[in-house]
Image: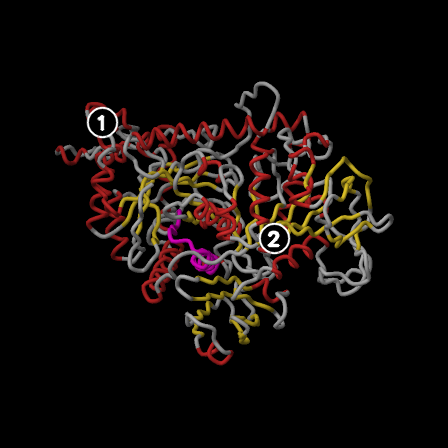
Amino acid sequence: MSHIELPPIGTLLGSAIYLDRADYVFQTTGRYYTSWVSEDHDPDWYLERVLSERQGNLVILWDGGATDRTLRAAAWWQDLAALGLEAPAPDWQERRFLVPSDWAPLAEHADRSGAGMVRFVAEAARKGIWSYVLYADAAPEWSQKLAAAGGRHYLGYNVGEKFSHRFDSDRKDTGKPSLTGLAAALRAAVREQVEARQASGWGDVMTTSCSFHLDYEIDAGATIPVTEDFAFAHLGMASALARGLYRQYDLPIWGTDIAHEHYSRLPYASPYKYPSLRHAFYLKYLAGCKLIHLESGNWWQQSDHVLDTVMHTTPKVDLGAIHRNDPRQTAAAVPEARKHYAQLGYDSAICRAYRREVTDFYDFLEAEGTPEGQPEARIAVVKGNLDLAGNEFHPNNAIGGAYRIAEENPHWFEGAPERGWDLVRQVFYPRPPVMKKLKNNFFSGTPHGQVDIVSFAGPISAAFLLEHYSLLIFCGWNTATEEQYRVLVEYVRGGGTLFISIPHLSTDDTRNYTGYAPESLVNGGDFTELCGVKVKGRGGRFYWATTPEMESPLGFARPQKYGVYCTRVGELEMTGSPEVLLVEDEQFRPLLLRHQCGRGQTYFLNSWDYPGAMAGDMNLSSLADEQGLLPLILRHLAMQVRGRVFITDDGQAPGPECDFIAWSWFPEANQVLAYNIDFDRPHELYVHLDGASTHVRLAPGELRRFDLPANSVSRSELALTMQTV
């Protein structure tokens, strides 16, 4: 892996530059969607405007098939101008000089494939602009020159969405279906691509998609995770995963590809359209992201995923599939398409608005800089071994895209294991209503601070976990191993706090998550050291959960029954002296136990089913703001491990107001940042540091910075350090 030298402002910010040319179709589905390219410039033209329009310090050279279908793009890619050859202009009426095969010099100089790319990367570096390449191929002679051409400004190659799980009509499954088999196939595909790119001199290999299996791509050799935000709807969860992988694998950087034009889904007429992009920039900044780029929208428009886009009025061409694109078949519609370019291109109001947002954020970075390092995350949620879920719970989503398997065995559709991630989103990354009647798919507060997602897909050590995290939580799928169990014991014995349930300790890899046999439990079901119990088998079902006494160490304000769950407990033998915190309400069989192990403790949920099976709640006499048993448990645990810096509604605990606040504590920079994610309403909170606290009122979209001295401060000193940025 390469070391990445960041610019003085501490963040790489920029946008994609596409090789596509005017009059060509970018993509088309025919009846509904045809996206026409409205601008006709070489990438060098955009490079100049990055400087003149202050569009940051980073460019992404994006091929995406343009060199295969566009003659002039192919000529630029081969840098035939350096040989004194000028590519002919396309003749749409006669359908001449449209595709590379229409001009003989391209075939004659095929060995120059990538020469333009190398020249561009070198020119960007001369201008002080960082770059990387996405979706492209080149002759090895030229890809081997990239590192020398770009020097410290060249970041590597991005494979994009190559490894996304899609409908599996072409997948040929053999043998008994297993998660192990799916994961092995994914790793092999990634490893093959990474090794080929590195051998050809492309450098570090990035991967960009909205896939929740990003951890497998990193474990298989990709070196820089770049989440496709807005496609990965929950920006906070995307950051948690990428940041956790960054720490876990000691990566050079983690980044975001902000696909706002395609997936923000807001009409251009909405007052939240461009402020939502602004939110994304600031939330990624708070999360520690130091590689931020806008996927599209600032140079020319691409998308139809907006109800009031002009692209809906352009001529539609049906070529049979979205990735089938033959300009000879679209040529007849070019004259009509040109009538719309003024509202879609560089000078359109929409593109100008996108560029303004990039410029404004770049101005902010130059004025304020970027906090060093990553924000503290005292809590980590485990993405378990062989967890191949999607990034949002969806009961129609097949695990790993394995729809044929799921049609035979419904357990391969997302279910209780994946619903556990909803608990994580609800507690640690809540998405409150911030856009009036519009649904908030994207923006979350961090009431308990930044929380990482760490992966058990690959090697992980207790030493790493203890160095970074006071609390480790299992909520989603996990296939346990003996080595994993040893690591968990070491983590708890070393002082960590663990939340885990019975299915997380099963070795099953066939998605048999309700009927797994007791024999499949790791360590033979003997969890004496970790949990203080042996699990002998499946116990009975129960309806309600409650406390064993009138008062509870979990902070119940009154006796309460939570349910109805209709799930099973485990049949336990107490082999230690765990404290019983929750029981089922008829026979008082233990449901939640706390076991001391060395310097740490395990909270053991005695449920045969995954926590997601208990995500809903219809508790008796429930209050409007109560969200169920599992969120109560997780909030209690988060309160136990909070550190020097935290926020509250009332001076005691995070409440509904804190759901609207995204905040970070950067220990290396000694800075706290707090941001109100609400577009329309102010919110009030208390910021706490080492026993001192101050009351803060944040205006809509306001970012407040606290520059803190190294030592403890009084309340008055804390208040004096605040400033709005």
Given the current orientation, which residue lies at the most extreme bottom position? 716
Badge 2 element: strand
On the rendered image, what quadrant is the N terminus found in?
Answer: top left
- Using the image, determine if residue 695 lies above or below residue 499: below
Percent coordinates x, y for residue 124 in the rendering: 23, 47
In-front residue for pair 701/689: 689
Left or right: 489 as drawn, with respect to 528: left
Percent coordinates x, y for residue 265 in the rendering: 52, 50
Where residue 87 sits, quadrant-wise, is: top left
User: Magenta stretch: residue 293 in it?
Assistant: yes
The residue indicated by pointer 1 is 106
Amino acid type, mark 1 = Leu
User: Magenta stretch: residue 489 in it?
Assistant: no
In-front residue for pair 373/17: 373
Percent coordinates x, y for residue 452 in the rendering: 52, 51
Left or right: 557 as drawn, with respect to 62: right
Report if residue 633 is visible in the image. Answer: yes
Badge 1 element: helix
Distance, label 1 to label 2, CA atoms, is 66 Å
Q: Residue 443 has which mark?
A: none
Within-10-Å neighbours for mark 1: few <14, some 14–19, many 20+: many
Within-10-Å neighbours for mark 2: few <14, some 14–19, many 20+: many
Span shown in magenta: 275-295
Asked whether the residues under the numbered discs 1 and 2 touch, taking CB atoms below 8 Å apart as contact, a structural biologist would say no
- Using the image, determine if residue 206 lies above or below residue 193: below
Amino acid type, mark 2 = Gly
In-front residue for pair 58/315: 58
The residue indicated by pointer 2 is 600
